[in-house]
Amino acid sequence: MGLRLISLIVISMIAGCNPPADYALVGSAYVPAAHGQVDVEKIDKEQILITVTLDHLVPPEKIELGLTHYIVWFAPVGERPVRQRALDYDPDAQVGRASIPTSLREFEVQITAENSETPNQPSDLLVASQKIREI
């Protein structure tokens, strides 16, 4: 009886935790070698932290002359993408990262190659995307 009760308590504790979720990212035809993930971590009742990591990410100017940044966009279901920020990009390691808090729970993360750090809308040069659903 005691061992069974302890097992139930442990299972309840594990089920009550919100472990971080991971979503795979695969590069598009523009950067087929790129891959990475989107990590989702609960901050509090309202906010989650989205961390995007892409490896084997060639410098943007190798995709097309004049491109300078990789930009992260969040596209809520049925809405236009909203610019979040540029990836912190290390050209030597060919790695891009960004951590972004949000209150969204169902949306698509999109990473595009852009010729500016502050574009008004995403270009057609979609590097990677992933749908996120954290309800």
Image (cartoon, grey):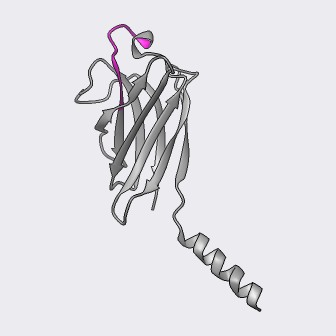
Residue occupying image coordinates x 46% and y 54%:
41
Residue occupying image coordinates x 22% and y 30%:
120
Find the magenta span and give its range: 63-71
Quadrant position of residue 36: top right
Quadrant position of residue 8: bottom right
- Examine the rendered structure and indicate whether residue 133 appears above or below residue 34: below
Q: In this view, does 11 lie to the left or right of 64?
A: right
Outermost bottom residue = 1
Residue 115: x %, y % from top left: 29, 17
Residue 7: x %, y % from top left: 71, 80
Q: In which quarter of the image is the C terminus?
A: bottom left
Outermost top residue = 65
Residue occupying image coordinates x 64% and y 81%:
9
**Camera-nearest residue between 6 and 117:** 6
Residue occupying image coordinates x 30% and y 45%:
79
Q: In which quarter of the image is the N terminus?
A: bottom right
- Examine the rendered structure and indicate whether residue 68 appears above or below residue 128: above
